[in-house]
Image (spheres, rainbow, N blue to C red):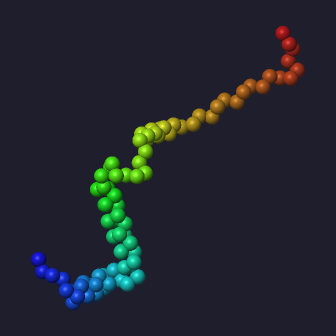
Amino acid sequence: MPNLGPTELIIILVIIIAIFGAGKLGDLGGALGRGVKDFKSAVQDPSDEKDSDDTPPQPVAAATPTEKAPEPVAEPEDAPEA
């Protein structure tokens, strides 16, 4: 495998700047860093997780259409008592 010297790295950097533009290099580097971090955390052994709790996830209730409750019937005020 050939070694990458400073000249080759400069050429690669110039090509990347030409493709993505100088303004997008920060976003590109940040996305690459987040991807590596996510990959490392996915590969990590589950027993090494510090913030894991042993409670199982709660099931999500299915959304059902809500029905409007019938309004109570008011008794007339002057109704004779039985």
28 left or right, relative to 63: left
Residue sitting at 80 percent across and 22 percent down? 75
36 left or right, relative to 56: left
Q: Position of residue 81 (x, y in %)?
A: 86, 13
73 left or right, relative to 5: right
Q: Position of residue 19 (x, y in %)?
A: 30, 82
| Visible residue check, residue 6 | yes
Residue sitting at 31 percent across and 60 percent down? 40
Furthest residue toward left: 1
The one nearer the camera, 51 or 76, is 51
The answer to whether residue 8 is above or below residue 40 is below
Furthest residue toward top: 82
Res 65 → quadrant: top right
The quadrant of the picture occupied by the C terminus is top right
Res 73 → quadrant: top right
Q: Position of residue 70 (x, y in %)?
A: 66, 29
The quadrant of the picture occupied by the N terminus is bottom left
The one nearer the camera, 53 or 57, is 53
